[in-house]
Amino acid sequence: MPATFPSNPLKRPFPDREFDRGLIMGHLRTAIFIFAALYVLRPFGMDFGPNAFAICLGYGLVTFLVAVTYSYVTEQVFGWHRCGPNWTLGKWILDCAAVLLLISLANFIYHNFTVGWGAFSWVVLVGVTVPTVLIGLFPIAMSGVLIQMQAERNNQRAAGSLARFGGLSTPATPPTHTELVSLTEEFALDPATLLFCESRQNYVRVLYLDGGAAREETIRTTLSALEEKLVGTTVRRCHRSYLVNTAHVTSARGNAQGLRLNLVAAEEEVPVSRRFVAGLREEVLG
């Protein structure tokens, strides 16, 4: 049965924030904002002296390096995945709080470097970092709610455009092709019977129809290799870890991360990432 989303926005899915070029550019924009705000506005009467441009640029650079390093290390080294149903608005806010804290610590050290370590004390550190994190979290939380609401609205609209196709597919044996496709040397099937493929490291989980019922097979290959072999069929990439047969989509629902598809004879839903939503909708609607 399809899962329902919690009414509490903090517990609802939040758009994926995986380490990629988009995330790096987001950190770069934040760093540029920090530099511009310090150099132009000089908040709290800050005086950077004759080297104001270089010093303010340094704050921006420290901000960028800390944010990128945090995102990379937590995902690639510690395995924190900022995606999927467990990645919620609440976790995103906590993640932002951690970044804010680390940036505050790093900029505190950088500030002391620029003033000859004259403000290097626990009292000053706490006085700078705690207000920064607490005050900074308020606009972050508000922007997060807006991002979540907009993503949910857009993806629910996309799911609604697919809804009129719901229920058209049935578990009856679908039309077959004239030949089977060899997914590996040991396993071949009719592409028309394929429901979806899920990548699991060096293996791929394949769910397909057999006599109207769903069957499962795990094969040693990659999703990209299967995608190449299935060119010309109704199987499409819908997620970095999934391929789906659009001919077997019975219904769809949207959340902040994209779509969740229901398929013929399948008990589980297939996720569709935001960047694949438009292409999938075009494929299904023709």
Image: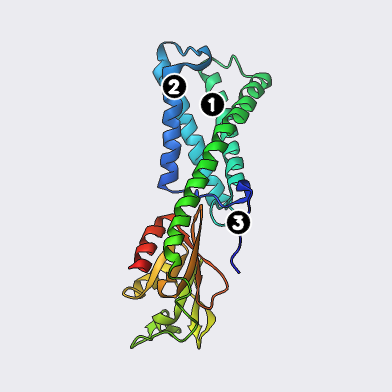
Q: Nearer the viewer, mark 3 or mark 1?
A: 3
The residue pinned by badge 3 equals: 5
Percent coordinates x, y for residue 254 in the rendering: 50, 58
Above/below status of 50 relative to 223: above
Give the residue type at disc 3.
Phe
Distance (Cα) linking label 1 and label 2: 11 Å
Q: Residues within 10 Å of mark 2 (few under 14, many from 20)?
A: many
Evaluate if marks 1 and 2 touch, with contact meaning CB atoms under 8 Å apart: no
Secondary structure at badge 1 equals helix
Q: Is residue 70 visible?
A: no
Q: Residues within 10 Å of mark 3 (few under 14, many from 20)?
A: few
Please report whichever mark, 3 or 2, sits nearer to the chain's N-terminal start: 3
Please identify the quadrant where the N terminus is shown.
Answer: bottom right
Please identify the quadrant where the C terminus is shown.
Answer: bottom left
Percent coordinates x, y for residue 195 in the rendering: 47, 76
Give the residue type at disc 2.
Cys
User: Residue at point 45% right, 17% down?
Assistant: 41
Point out which mark residue 56 bears. 2
Secondary structure at badge 3 equals loop
Total number of numbered discs in the rendering: 3
The residue pinned by badge 1 equals: 107
Distance (Cα) linking label 3 and label 1: 39 Å
Above/below status of 180 relative to 23: below
Please report whichever mark, 3 or 1, sits nearer to the chain's N-terminal start: 3
Give the residue type at disc 1.
Asn
Please report whichever mark, 1 or 2, sits nearer to the chain's N-terminal start: 2
